[in-house]
Image (spheres, rainbow, N blue to C red):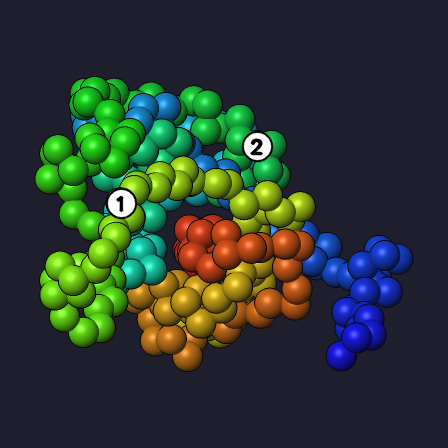
Amino acid sequence: MHRPIPHDSAHKHVTGEALYVDDLPEPAGTAHLYLGLSDRAHAKIIALDLDAVRASAGVLAVLTAADIPGVNDMSSTGRHDEVLLATDLVSYHRQPIFAVVGETRDAARRACLAAKVSYEDLPPVVTLEEARSVGADFVTEPLKLERGDIASALEASPRRLEGSMRVGGQEHFYLEGQVALAVPGEDNDVTIHSSTQHPSEIQHIVSHALGVPSHAVTVEVRRMGGAFGGKETQGNLFACLAALAAK
């Protein structure tokens, strides 16, 4: 108490010796993955033509939902309401539809631009009121904390306070973004180096996506370049697709 205690790796942070996922030596033959993202906020996918993507220089593979051997889901709540790759419906802007595995990151990025996607636009739902008006479900069940007889307490109270509060979303700003490096092992085994606050969830989601037992998936987290809660669940997508590409 009442004295400064240095972080156990503070000296590495200030000298540049601290290693993050992006600093790990790349195994020989490492491939790079880039996401093909929707340019619509809410739409049906009518047609998806990836022939030109597959024919692009430096492309090793193109992954769609059909290539996921297990479950096409990365939701942390267990409601199966957040797919890895969209199939017939886009529900938010820049939602991943496919992924390109390339010899280099730039080759994969350029190949994504050759995709031809046809959409049928649907009305966007961007506010809480709009979501409730179309009957959208809660992400999780409402939490209610009660003690005693609330109605009687309010009735007997000499004063009451009423008000409302709105809280907008806030992007977590960390210097190291979402990142994953997947290294295939024997049989079904895969090791994932991930910048995540929740390695056990990464293991769980990846094993379900690959359709393999949890013990086949090892998740390594050396350190994170910031997180603030934004790396509790959002690393699932990148870890799953990296593992899928590796296997």
Residue 194 vs residue 139: left or right?
right
Residue 110 in picture, x, y percent from top left: 53, 26
Which residue occupies 22% across, 63% down? 144
* The N terminus, quarter of image: bottom right
Residue name at image x 16 percent, y 47 percent? 137
Q: Residue furthest right?
A: 15
Against 107, is 239 above or below? below
| Residue at 58% from the left image edge and 55% from the top image edge | 227
**Residue closer to the observer: 29 or 239:** 239
Q: Which residue is mark 1?
A: 162
Q: How many marks?
A: 2
Residue at image mark 2 = 107
**Secondary-structure class at tag 2:** helix
Q: What label sits on residue 31 in the rendered view? A: none
Q: CA distance from mark 1 to mark 2?
A: 57 Å
Residue 195 percent coordinates (x, y): 58, 58
Camera-side residue of 230 and 36: 230
The answer to whether residue 53 is visible is yes
In this orientation, which residue lies closer to the viewer: 189 or 17?
A: 17
* Residue sitting farthest toward the front: 158
User: Where is residue 246 drawn, in percent x and y?
Assistant: 48, 57
Amino acid tagged 2: Ala
Which one is earlier in the sequence, the residue at label 1 or at label 2?
Answer: 2
